[in-house]
Image (tube, helix red, strand yellow):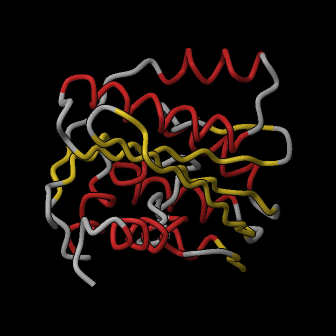
Amino acid sequence: MSRPLLLASASSIRLQLLHQAGLEATAQPARIDEATIRDALLAEHAKPRDIADALAEMKARKLAEKNPTALVLGCDQVLALKDQLFSKPESIEEARQQLVLLRGQTHQLISALVLYDQGKPIWRHVATASLTMREVSDSYLDAYLARNWHSIQHSVGGYKLEEEGIRLFTALVGDYFTILGLPLLPLLGFLATRDFIDT
């Protein structure tokens, strides 16, 4: 890259994806009150895609204010089941409740990216993937959570497709990178058109 990328996220998978794509990136999580912002947007009847976009924007802006000359990438992902928005589970019991609601249903993962340069937004992208969860048994669900809670506790919905969570699903429609929380191909395309990366 012509300049290093500052990732406004604590997500290890996002940083790993950027590194695997050959990008020089450093993670520096932006501290924002996501729950309060999400609740305020929900009170205004904002759509899930707009909530993801707003949270990604706020993360990028906060980090860009502290690093005004940097290229900053803000990211956010929300899970929507019909009219219900899911957050990261705070306990294994909450993760179980979420998975019980999701099983046998199709839900959407919405991933938003906002790129700041020199303290200003220069690009944004929102992508959606649909996932259909199988009717897993209560006994499997309990065993799955016991085995995987340490890993999935920071994942919205309580699963990771790159791990055992893939066994929960019967169908996936959409880009795999969107499901992981980083729509990588549109990002790389934009970086290439602006000569931030070689092509």
Q: Quadrant of the C terminus?
A: bottom left
Q: In this view, does 128 lie to the left or right of 112?
A: right
Count of marks overlaid on the render? 0
Q: Which of 47 and 4 is in front in this view?
A: 4
Which image quarter: residue 14? bottom left
In the image as oriented, which residue stretches furthest toward the bottom?
A: 199
Q: Is residue 22 left or right of residue 43?
A: left
Residue occupying image coordinates x 26% and y 76%: 21
When the figure is inspected, residue 72 is found, relative to residue 183, above or below; the finding is above
In the image as oriented, which residue stretches furthest toward the front?
A: 194
Q: In this view, does 194 lie to the left or right of 100?
A: left
Residue occupying image coordinates x 67% and y 15%: 40
Q: Is residue 85 left or right of residue 166?
A: right
Task: Point out residue 129 in the picture as x, y percentages from the top left corner.
Answer: 67, 66
Q: Which of 128 and 159 is in front in this view?
A: 128
Q: In which quarter of the image is the N terminus?
A: bottom left
Q: Nearer the viewer, residue 65 or 29?
A: 65
In the image as oriented, which residue stretches furthest toward the right?
A: 82
Which image quarter: residue 86? top right
